[in-house]
Image (tube, helix red, strand yellow):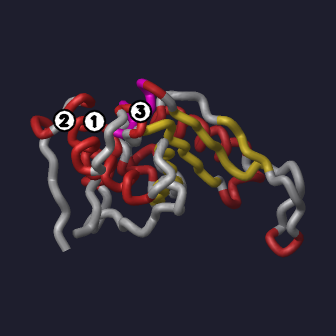
């Protein structure tokens, strides 16, 4: 399997991406071209819900990675098998839009994904049927804002890229135009 590599000079301008998509998808209206709407980053804290220090550490980490203050998510229902009560802290989430979304997206493609261990590309099967793409990272150390000395326990995160198109093929075409490293 090979992964398409992109250098800093290969980045396309938004107008060029739009024109390429209109031609590739055979769209006549500019408004029909798919575009990025938002990126949602979720981080579960797992067994750290009892330890305030670990909760603060996770919040600070996600804030540094995304450049925005995260929101604490809580359990909606009690689940006895997992030892979870309603209202317990479960994790953090951040919704990125506009400029912060574009900066995070560029950082994800050009810095974070190439730094992941044994990276061979992303699966094209992670679309949800509505044009949204979700990927998971197992550790937070791949972000340039985090040094390995700061990591006391490993926390993963889920990144959902919400795209304006309802079709997975159009959403995949958009991500490919941006240089998203899919497996070939």
- Farthest residue in the top direction? 99
Q: Is residue 24 magenta?
A: no
- Residue sitting nearer the eye, 173 or 60: 173
Q: Position of 83 compared to 109: left or right? A: right
Alpha carbon separation for disc pair 3 and 1: 10 Å
The residue that mark 1 highlights is 18
Label placed on residue 12: 2
Residue at the disc numbered 3: 31
The residue lying toward the viewer, choosing from 98 and 18, is 18
- Secondary element at tag 1: helix
Question: On the picture, is 79 further left or further right than 64?
Answer: right
N-terminal of the two: label 3 or label 2? 2
How crowded pointer 3 is (Cα within 10 Å; few <14, some 14-19, many 20+) is rated as few
> In which image quadrant can residue 21 be found?
top left
In the image, what residue occupies the spot 65% across and 44% down? 92
- For marks 2 and 1, give the CA distance: 10 Å
CA gap between label 3 and label 2 equals 19 Å
Question: Which region shows up in magenta?
Answer: 99-105
First in sequence: mark 2 or mark 1?
2
Nearer to the camera, 148 or 110: 110
Give x and y (percent) for residue 176.
27, 52
Considering the image in quadrants, where does the C terminus appear? bottom left
Eye-nearest disc, 3 or 2? 3
């Amino acid at each position: 399997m090979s992964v398409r590599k992109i250098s800093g000079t290969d980045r396309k301008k938004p107008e060029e991406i739009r024109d390429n998509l209109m031609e590739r998808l055979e769209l006549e209206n500019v408004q029909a071209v798919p575009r990025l709407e938002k990126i949602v980053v979720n981080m579960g804290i797992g067994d750290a819900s009892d330890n305030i220090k670990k909760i603060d550490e996770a919040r600070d980490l996600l804030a540094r990675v995304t450049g925005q203050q995260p929101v604490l998510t809580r359990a909606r229902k009690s689940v006895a098998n997992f030892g979870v009560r309603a209202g317990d802290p479960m994790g953090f989430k951040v919704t990125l839009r506009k400029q912060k979304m574009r900066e995070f997206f560029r950082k994800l493609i050009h810095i974070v994904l190439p730094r992941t261990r044994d990276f061979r590309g992303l699966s094209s099967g992670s679309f949800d049927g509505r044009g949204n793409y979700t990927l998971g990272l197992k550790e937070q150390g791949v972000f340039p804002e985090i040094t390995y000395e700061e990591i006391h326990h490993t926390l993963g995160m889920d990144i959902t890229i919400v795209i304006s198109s309802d079709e997975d093929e159009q959403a995949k075409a958009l991500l490919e135009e941006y240089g998203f490293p899919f497996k070939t």
